């Protein structure tokens, strides 16, 4: 259980039922005058006032109205609220404007119309956003049962990699993927475990992957070593240690060598995502294969997709699905997307300018400026 104030971004592990009717009493949706509807009556004497939270019982006949505020309880014998703006107020009397809309039941929020008592408010498995916290609070839940976060082990492979605090000499680079993926896992509300860097050495990698799979992680993400390089051992090692390969290589760019598999333990199945080492490929494949699939299991979260007009020509002549880094803007005449600089999948600075991936489908060739394309927000 977690305090409701700490529950946003968590996945709820119980159904929440409404403990009361929502709203709990019939109330006014407007500042106005409550009346008993009668289509032949167009003026009323004002017989009192009720503000929100200050109910006073009013006896009424067809000819009297009560001045009522938004959220104020409506006495049982009233059924309709005329907005202030639709009336002319004279001393102790109101007159309905000649052009005002006037119909039975208008501007009344009926008791239980939002959600009747004892009905399902929030379904188990929902990824909690502020709008769910609102409903839980209205249902009186100060504490919410939530699922343990999944543990995502993140391991990067490569002889060229050094960690963040080292100065990469000669032919080395900093292992940025490690931190990209830690951040990406946190962003989807799960727990990253930094498994560090492992060199391109068969035995080392095998030992590290085996011990990681035998720890308490639920998901293993690796980067690098799944391509066709001479030292790309990761995929072979998966086979040796008995991982069930579900797919390897997808017809996309970047990210083609991505591999997905599972490892069966007595108590659970560990999911394995082996992402390519290029920093852009790693982030793109995380979004496509981990974020999208994982979050769509939580009832309510999906990648955000927006159609936008291209402000640049795109050269694309192969039959892969491309995910191109773009900058989407919402202008007065609609969504426009431009390409960010160099599209090489090693370019970190360029990638940091992107807020979306422009999707160019397999059979689409050389889309031109002005055409529409789908963008996935990242
Ligand atoms: P690989 O998939 O192992 O062939 O690596 C492809 C490219 O990604 C190479 O240029 C690597 O140097 C680079 N790379 C691999 N791992 C990382 C990492 N953790 N951070 C940044 N770049 C990486
Ligand atoms: Mg490598």
Image: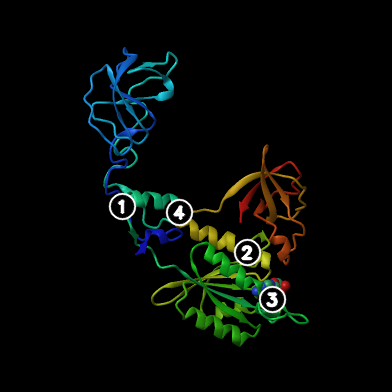
**Left/right of residue 154 with respect to residue 25 in the rendered view:** right
Given this view, does label 4 or label 2 mark the residue nearer the observer?
4
Element type where label 2 sits in the image: helix
Q: Which mark is residue 307?
A: none
Residue at point 65%, 69% (across, down): 276
Q: CA distance from mark 4 to mark 2?
A: 24 Å
Q: Residue furthest front?
A: 91
Pick the quarter of the image with the C terminus: bottom right
Q: Categorize mark 3 by other alpha carbons within 10 Å: few (<14), some (14-19), many (20+).
A: some
Q: Earlier in the sequence, mark 1 or mark 3?
A: 1
Given this view, does label 1 or label 3 mark the residue nearer the observer?
1
Q: Earlier in the sequence, mark 2 or mark 1?
A: 1
Given this view, does label 3 or label 2 mark the residue nearer the observer?
3
Residue at point 62%, 82% (across, down): 198
Given this view, does label 4 or label 1 mark the residue nearer the observer?
1
Q: Which mark is residue 283?
A: 2
Q: Earlier in the sequence, mark 4 or mark 1?
A: 4
Q: Which mark is residue 140?
A: 1
Disc 2 Cβ-to-ligand 1 distance below 8 Å: no
Q: Categorize mark 2 by other alpha carbons within 10 Å: few (<14), some (14-19), many (20+).
A: many
Pick the quarter of the image with the N terminus: bottom left
Disc 3 Cβ-to-ligand 1 distance below 8 Å: yes
Disc 4 vs disc 1: Cβ atoms closer than 8 Å?
no
x and y, in percent, of residue 317 in the image: 76, 53
Residue at point 34%, 48% (across, down): 138
Q: Quadrant of ligand 2?
A: bottom right
Q: Which mark is residue 129?
A: 4
Q: Categorize mark 4 by other alpha carbons within 10 Å: few (<14), some (14-19), many (20+).
A: some
x and y, in percent, of residue 324 in the image: 69, 55
- Disc 3: which residue: 174
Q: CA distance from mark 1 to mark 3?
A: 49 Å
């Amino acid at each position: 259980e977690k305090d409701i104030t700490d529950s946003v971004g968590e996945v709820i592990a119980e159904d929440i039922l409404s403990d009361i009717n929502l709203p709990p009493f019939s109330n006014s949706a407007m500042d106005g005058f409550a009346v008993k509807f009668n289509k032949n009556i167009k003026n009323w004497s004002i017989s009192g006032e009720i503000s929100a939270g200050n109910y006073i019982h009013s006896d009424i006949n067809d000819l009297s109205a009560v001045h009522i505020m938004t959220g104020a309880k409506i006495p049982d014998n009233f059924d309709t609220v005329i907005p202030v703006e639709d009336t002319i107020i004279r001393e102790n009397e109101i007159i309905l404007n000649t052009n005002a809309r006037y119909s039975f039941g208008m501007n009344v929020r009926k008791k239980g119309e939002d959600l009747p008592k004892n009905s399902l408010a929030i379904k188990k498995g929902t990824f909690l956003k502020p709008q769910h916290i609102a409903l839980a609070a209205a249902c009186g839940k100060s504490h919410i049962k939530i699922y343990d976060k999944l543990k995502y082990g993140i391991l990067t492979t490569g002889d060229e990699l050094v960690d963040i605090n080292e100065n990469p000499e000669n032919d080395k680079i900093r292992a940025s993927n490690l931190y990209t993926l830690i951040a990406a896992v946190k962003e989807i509300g799960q727990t990253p475990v930094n498994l560090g860097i492992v060199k391109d050495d068969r035995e080392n990698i095998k030992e590290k992957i085996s011990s990681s799979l035998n720890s308490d992680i639920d998901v293993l993400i690796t980067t690098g070593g799944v391509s066709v390089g001479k030292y790309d051992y990761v995929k072979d090692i998966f086979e040796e240690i008995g991982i069930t390969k579900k797919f390897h290589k997808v017809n996309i760019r970047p990210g083609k060598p991505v591999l997905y598999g599972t490892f069966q333990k007595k108590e659970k199945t560990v999911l394995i995502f082996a992402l390519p080492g290029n920093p852009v490929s790693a982030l793109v494949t995380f979004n496509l294969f981990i974020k999208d699939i994982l979050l769509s299991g939580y009832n309510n979260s999906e990648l955000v997709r927006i159609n936008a007009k291209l402000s640049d020509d795109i050269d694309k002549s192969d039959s892969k699905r491309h995910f191109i880094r773009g900058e989407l803007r919402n202008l007065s005449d609609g969504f426009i997307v431009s390409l960010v600089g160099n599209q090489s999948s090693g370019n970190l600075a360029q990638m940091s300018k992107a807020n979306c991936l422009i999707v160019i489908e397999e059979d689409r060739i050389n889309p031109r400026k002005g055409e529409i394309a789908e963008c996935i927000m990242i």
